[in-house]
């Protein structure tokens, strides 16, 4: 009877290890995906950060105020999404580093 209880305890411990591993692996995979997304967003934001050019075009009359505002809104919404993804990545990373201790 004691041997059966030990076997059950070992199986439960092993199951818990597998569950923890799978959870960490899922978080790690998600973090890698978020990191790739951040790189794409960063490159896109650097390529379209033209607020100075937009202001010059507005001042020169080449853009209407509505077009100017729409362009800035798009840029700021993209920046907001970038920061949101970065926050989520940092939260995942902190959870993963917790297990590193």
Image: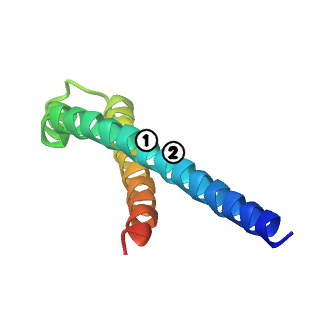
Query: Going 24% across and 32% down the picture, which residue do you hit?
Result: 44
Q: Residue furthest right?
A: 1
Q: Residue furthest bottom?
A: 101
Residue labelled with disc 2:
26
Point out the image quarter for the C terminus.
Answer: bottom left
Q: Is residue 15 visible?
A: yes
- For mark 1, does the 10 Å Cα neighbourhood hold few (<14), some (14 to 19), or many (20 or more) residues? few
Tell me residue 52's x, y (percent): 13, 42
Given residues 29 and 20, the one toward you in this image is 20
Given residues 78 and 59, the one toward you in this image is 78
Point out the image quarter for the N terminus.
Answer: bottom right
Query: Going 19% across and 41% down the picture, which residue do you hit?
Result: 51
Horizontally, residue 32 falls left or right of residue 14, namely: left
What's the colour scheme? rainbow
Q: Quadrant of residue 59?
A: top left
Given residues 93 and 37, the one toward you in this image is 93
- For mark 2, does the 10 Å Cα neighbourhood hold few (<14), some (14 to 19), or many (20 or more) residues? few
Residue labelled with disc 1:
29
Q: Are marks 2 and 1 in contact (CB under 8 Å)?
A: yes
Tell me residue 24's x, y (percent): 49, 53
Query: Going 47% across and 47% down the picture, which residue do you hit?
Result: 25
Q: Is residue 77 visible?
A: no
Q: Quadrant of residue 99?
A: bottom left
Distance Cα–Cα, label 2 vs label 1: 5 Å
Horizontally, residue 41 falls left or right of residue 19, namely: left
Horizontally, residue 20 falls left or right of residue 38, namely: right
Tell me residue 98's x, y (percent): 43, 71
């Amino acid at each position: 009877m004691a041997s059966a209880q030990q076997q059950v305890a070992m199986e439960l411990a092993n199951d818990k290890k597998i569950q923890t591993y799978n959870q960490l692996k899922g978080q790690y995979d998600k973090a890698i995906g978020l990191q790739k997304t951040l790189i794409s967003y960063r490159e896109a934001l650097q390529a379209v950060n033209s607020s100075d050019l937009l202001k010059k075009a507005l001042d020169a009359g080449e853009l209407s105020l509505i077009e100017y505002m729409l362009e800035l809104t798009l840029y700021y919404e993209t920046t907001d999404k970038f920061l949101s993804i970065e926050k989520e990545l940092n939260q995942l990373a902190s959870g993963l580093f917790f297990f590193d201790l």
